[in-house]
Amino acid sequence: MARTILENGPSTAADLALRLDLTPAAVRRHLDHLVDEGVVESRDQKVYGTRGRGRPAKVFALTEAGRDSFDQQYDDLAVQAMRFLAETQGEDAVVEFARRRVAFVERDYAAVMATDPDLTPAEALARVFTQNGYAASVRDLPAANGQSVGEQLCQQHCPVSHVAHEFPQLCEAETEAIASVLGTHVQRLATIAHGDGVCTTCIPQTPKISEKEKA
């Protein structure tokens, strides 16, 4: 169940029951156990766009301790290496390292779009990030009138979240890389490194260019 939350982000009990084909009672028992162990915690569901009436639904998200069981065992070594780089080479070196680390975004994005041109930019990015150790997915970003104005790129798992907590340049480089391949401004709404349950980036909708317009 913890892995399902990792891969899909903060989830309601009903969502978990549906994904795992379990009864609500069984899900509640599992969740109570995970909460007692400090693996997950309940919180109010964040609502982007227009919010309906009533209280927001309760969702269950991984705690920092819960993520520790999935994160790589070299976090401490990576943090120490980044500190050494910052102390000996300065801030610019940290920024350059962060940008080189996400070079895969530009490298792989064009290849994914060439292979499957029907993907939206956000869907292509989700595939790129997932192939590189993230559990990424896409959600519509609704406007007040109910019409989609774009999509959210959601990263339910970040392989460098612990390091990025101390070195936000890693998150900033990701956002830069996304904006660069799309050729437009994007907005980072939340990050795991700052305590959110999922990293979310707003990808604005861009109209598709017809073959006639290309000509």
Image (cartoon, rainbow, N blue to C red):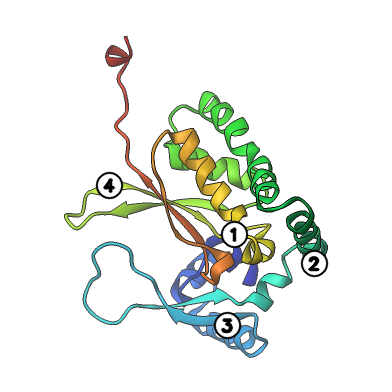
Given this view, does label 1 or label 3 mark the residue nearer the observer? 1
**Above or below, comparing residue 33 to residue 70 in the picture:** below
Given this view, does label 4 or label 1 mark the residue nearer the observer? 1
Sooner in the amino-acid sequence: mark 2 or mark 1:
2
| Residue at the spot 33% in from the left edge and 53% down from the top edge | 141
Label 4 to label 3, Cα distance in Å?
Answer: 35 Å
Q: Secondary structure at mark 1?
A: loop
Residue 101 in sight? yes
Question: Which of the pair 196/167 is nearer the observer?
Answer: 167
Residue type at the position of mark 3: Leu
Q: Is residue 97 left or right of residue 144?
A: right
| Residue at the spot 32% in from the left edge and 35% down from the top edge | 206
Given this view, does label 2 or label 3 mark the residue nearer the observer? 2
| Residue at the spot 39% in from the left edge and 43% down from the top edge | 185
Question: Which of the pair 22/144 is nearer the observer?
Answer: 144
Residue 21 in sight? no
Q: Which residue is mark 2?
A: 76
Residue type at the position of mark 4: Val
Q: Quadrant of the C terminus?
A: top left
- The x, y position of residue 187, in whole percent, is 40, 52
Q: Secondary structure at mark 3?
A: helix
Report crowding for label 3: few under 14, some 14 to 19, many 20 or more residues within 10 A (C-alpha): many
Q: Quadrant of the N terminus?
A: bottom right
Label 4 to label 2, Cα distance in Å?
Answer: 40 Å
Sooner in the amino-acid sequence: mark 4 or mark 1:
4
- The x, y position of residue 90, in whole percent, is 71, 53
Q: Residue furthest bottom?
A: 36
Q: Which residue is mark 1?
A: 168
